[in-house]
Image (cartoon, rainbow, N blue to C red):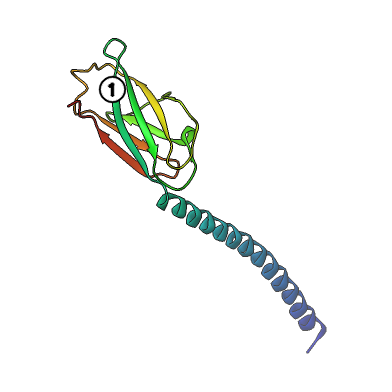
Amino acid sequence: MGFSEIYGVAFLSIILLISITVIYGTVDSNLNNILSANDDHAYNLLKKSKENLTVQYEGIDSDSGILNITVVNNGNILEDASKWTVIFEGDVVNNPVIEKTYIEPLSRTQIYIETIYNSTTIDDKRVVISGEFGTTFLKTIDVN
């Protein structure tokens, strides 16, 4: 075996070691990201399973059209109402007025939604609240 063959094998071995080091670093970093995302997903699924809201129709001001909804936290986690999405009749309500930002278990808050309806036309309209962890809660308004 000549000098050039030894030099060639050594050179290829060094290139192979450098390549393995780079690939390992990339795979290890991506694997950590995947495992972290998996942990976050499991945490959110656990919180979602403990999320339980009850939506109740309280009334509507016929003059202003402001709808009053009560939301009761029947779950066993603290809810951040600023992370809720409120949907009325298929449209996302951009700025609903929510009395309390943080709702403890077994407590309630009021939500006020500006609408074009009154007490005679609000019947059979739907309100959907998507909780902090993505669980949706539907209330079909029944005036009677």
How many numbered tags mark residues here? 1
**Hey, which residue is sitting farthest top in the picture?**
63
**For the residue marked with disc 1, what is the amino acid?**
Gly
User: What residue appears at the point 63 percent right and 60 percent down from the top-left corner?
Assistant: 29
**Relative side of 9 to 90, left or right:** right
- Are there few (<14), some (14-19), or many (20+) residues within 10 Å of tag 1? some
Corner quadrant of residue 1: bottom right
**Residue 46, placed above or below residue 70:** below
Residue 116 is situated, as x and y percent measured from the top left of the image, at 27, 16
Reading the image, the residue beneath label 1 is: 59
In the image, residue 136 sits, relative to residue 20, either above or below, namely above
Image location (x, y in percent) of residue 110? 40, 27
Q: Secondary structure at mark 1?
A: strand
Q: Residue 33, located in which quarter of the rendered image?
A: bottom right
**Residue 80 or 91: which is nearer the viewer?**
80
Q: Is residue 32 above or below residue 126?
A: below
